[in-house]
Amino acid sequence: MKQWGGGGRLRRVQVGNALSAFGSGFTMPYMFVYVDQVRGLGSAAAGAVFTVFALAALAVLPFTGRGIDRYGPRPVLLAGAAIASVGAFAFGQAATTPGLLISSFLFGAGVTTCQPALATMIVRLTGKEQRSRAFALQFTLVNLGMGLGALVGGQIVDVADPASLTRLFTIEALTFLGLAAVTGTARIPAAALEVAGSAGAGERRGLRALVADKAMLRLCLLAGLIFFTCYGQFESGVAAFATDTVGTAPSTLGLAIGANALTIVVLQMFVVRLTERRRRTTAMAAAGVVWLAAWGMALVAGLIRSEALAATVAVVAIYALFGVGESLLAPTLGPIVADLAPTRLLGTYNAGYALVKQIAVAVGPAVGVLLVGAGTWPLYLAAMALCTLLIVALSVKLRGHLTPAQDNVRVLTVAQRPVRELRTAA
C-alpha cells in the first residue's frame, strides 16, 4: 500500500472509497426491481426514481464545491454520508411513489456529495508524485467494492420477499455510517490546507473561476465525452446491444461485466507504472484508441451474431477492452483536475468535474438505449466510434493548454544533463 501513496489517513480514505462503492454495488442493480416488482409501482415510477436520483446531483454539487472550499472536505463528507444513510434507510421503508422519490433524492444527494469530498481528501493527503497512484488505487477499490457489493446483494435479494430488499437498503445505510466513522474522522494535514489564494488564482471565486479557466473547460468537455461514450454505455447501450441484437444471455453478460472488473484489477498496477513516466494526454488518447478497438469488436459481434460462441467471445472482449481504457484513465483525470485547480478552489473544481461526469452518465444510457432499441445498431456503433475518435483528437489538443507539470512531462531529466557533464569535466 505504501508504494501507492500510503499513510494511515490516506488508507482510511481509500477504505472509505471501497465502502461507498460496496454500498452502491449492493443496491443499485436492484433499485429498479424493488420499485417495479417488489412495491408493484410499475416501470414509470422506477424510471422517475432514477431520474430524481440523477437530478439530486445537479442540485447539490454546486453547493458541495463551495462547502469543501470553505469548511474542508471532512465536514462535507460527514454531511453527505449522513444524508445518504437516511436516504438509503428511508428508501427501503418507503412503499409509495412520493415516499420513494423523496428518499431517492436524499440518497442521490448524499452519494454525490461524498464523491468530490473523497477526491479532495486524496489530493490533500498526497504529494504530486503520489497522486496518480492514489487515484489509480481508488479506482481499483471502487471496482472491487461495487463488484463485491453486487455479488453479496444478489445473495440477499428475493423478489418474493419485500423484507429482503428492506434489509438490503438498511445494510447500505450502515455502510455510509461506516464511511463516516472510518474516513470522516481522518484529519487533513494543516500544511495541505489553503491559507491564502494561490498564485495565478485570480480574483474570481467559485464556479466563475472554473468557467474562466479555459484548460479546465477543455478538460470538462473531454471528460464529458469520455463518460458519455464509455461509462454511460457499457452498462446500458452496450448491454442492450449485446442482449437484444447479438442475443447474449444475461448470465453471459454478467461474465462480460466481470471480465471488465477483472481486467481493471489485474492491469491497474502495471498501467499506473507505465503512465507515470508519460504524458497524461498520451494516456487519455491511448484510452480512446483502445475503446475504438472495443467498438470495432462490437461491430464484429453484430455481424457474426448467428455464431453464438464467436459472438460471445466478442462481447466479452468488448468489456475487457473497456477495462483496459479505464485503467489508462484512472491515474490521469483526477490528478489533472487537482493540478489545474487553485488550492483554495479544489473543492469547486472537483465538484464541477463530478457534475460533468453525472450529466454525461445520465445522458449516455438514454441515447444508447434509444438507438439500439430503435433497431439502428449500426448507427449506434458508428456514433460511438466517432465519439471515440473525438476523444483521441481532444486529448492531443488538450496538450497545448496544459503546463508540462500538469501533463506529467519530466522536464528535470533534460536539465540535469549539463550538470553531469560539468562534474565530469571538473
Image (cartoon, rainbow, N blue to C red):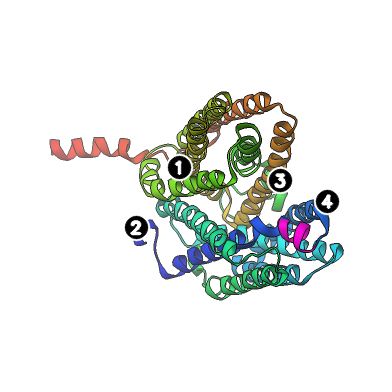
**Closer to the N terminus: mark 1 or mark 4?**
4
Q: Is 47 placed above or below 232 here?
A: below
Q: Do tag 1 and tag 3 residues touch (Cβ < 8 Å)?
A: no
Q: Nearer the viewer, mark 2 or mark 1?
A: 2
Kind of residue sitting beneath label 3: Ala
Q: How packed is label 4: few (under 14 Cα within 10 Å), some, or many (20 or more)?
A: few
| Left or right side of 42 for 262 | left
Query: Which segment is the magenta one?
Result: 33-39
List the residue tagged with mark 1: 405
Q: Earlier in the sequence, mark 1 or mark 3?
A: 3
Element type at mark 4: helix
Which mark is in front, 3 or 4?
4
| Badge 1 amino acid | Ala
Q: Is residue 387 left or right of residue 107?
A: left
- Front disc: 2 or 4: 4
Q: Secondary structure at mark 1?
A: loop
Q: Residues within 10 Å of mark 3 (few under 14, many from 20)?
A: some
Instruction: Residue at 59%, 69% (x, y): give it.
Output: 74
Q: Amino acid at mark 4?
A: Ala
Distance from disc 1 to disc 4, alpha carbons, whole Å, reads 49 Å
| Residue position for label 4 | 44
Looking at the picture, which amino acid does disc 2 mark?
Gln
Q: Nearer the viewer, residue 383 or 55?
A: 383
Label 2 packing within 10 angstroms: few (<14), some (14-19), many (20+): few
Q: Nearer the viewer, mark 1 or mark 3?
A: 3
Name the image quarter holding the N terminus.
bottom left
